[in-house]
Image (spheres, rainbow, N blue to C red):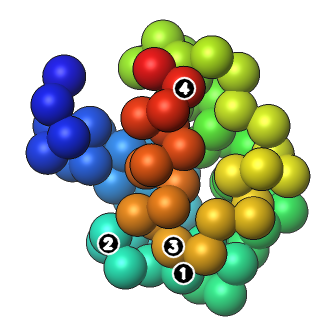
Amino acid sequence: MDRAELEKKVLELATMAFKREITIDTKVKEDMGKTSMNMVALLSEIENELDTDPLEIPTAAACDTMKELIDLVEENL
């Protein structure tokens, strides 16, 4: 999977988890709520769909934007 496909898939999963449009520039902490159940669901979906190593909630929540979260996912593929 190349970077463009990864971005598209993660943004698609985030849009489904948060039930609103999520872009590469969406701020994780401000716009999505770093400790919400939706974040837990998103990380679980990412792990299952993309077969990543486990993504820890505190590490993912420390990402400022979806771009940084996607970088984290890419590192864990």
Q: For the point 54% across and 26% down, which residue is it?
A: 76
The earlier-in-sequence mark between 4 and 3 is 3
Circles 2 and 4 in contact, beta carbons < 8 Å: no
Q: Is residue 52 above or below residue 33?
A: above
Measure the alpha-carbon separation of dots 1 and 4.
21 Å
Q: Which residue is mark 3?
A: 65
Measure the alpha-carbon separation of dots 3 and 1.
4 Å
Image-based side of 17 in relation to 13, left or right? right
**Which residue appears farthest toward the top when viewing the image?**
51
Q: Is residue 44 visible?
A: yes
Q: Amino acid under label 3?
A: Thr
- Of discs 1 and 4, which sits in the foreground? 4
Measure the alpha-carbon separation of dots 2 and 4.
21 Å
Rate crowding at label 3 as few (under 14), some (14 to 19) or many (20 or more) other CA atoms within 10 Å.
many
Circles 3 and 1 in contact, beta carbons < 8 Å: yes
Q: Amino acid under label 1?
A: Lys
The earlier-in-sequence mark between 3 and 1 is 1
Q: Residue 15, position in %: x, y?
A: 39, 58
- Of discs 4 and 3, which sits in the foreground? 4
Rate crowding at label 2 as few (under 14), some (14 to 19) or many (20 or more) other CA atoms within 10 Å.
some
Name which quarter of the figure residue 45 lies in.
Answer: top right
The earlier-in-sequence mark between 1 and 4 is 1
Q: Amino acid under label 2?
A: Thr
Q: Quadrant of the N terminus?
A: top left
Helix, strand, or loop for circle 2?
A: loop
The earlier-in-sequence mark between 2 and 4 is 2
Q: Which residue is mark 4?
A: 76
Q: Which residue is mark 2?
A: 23
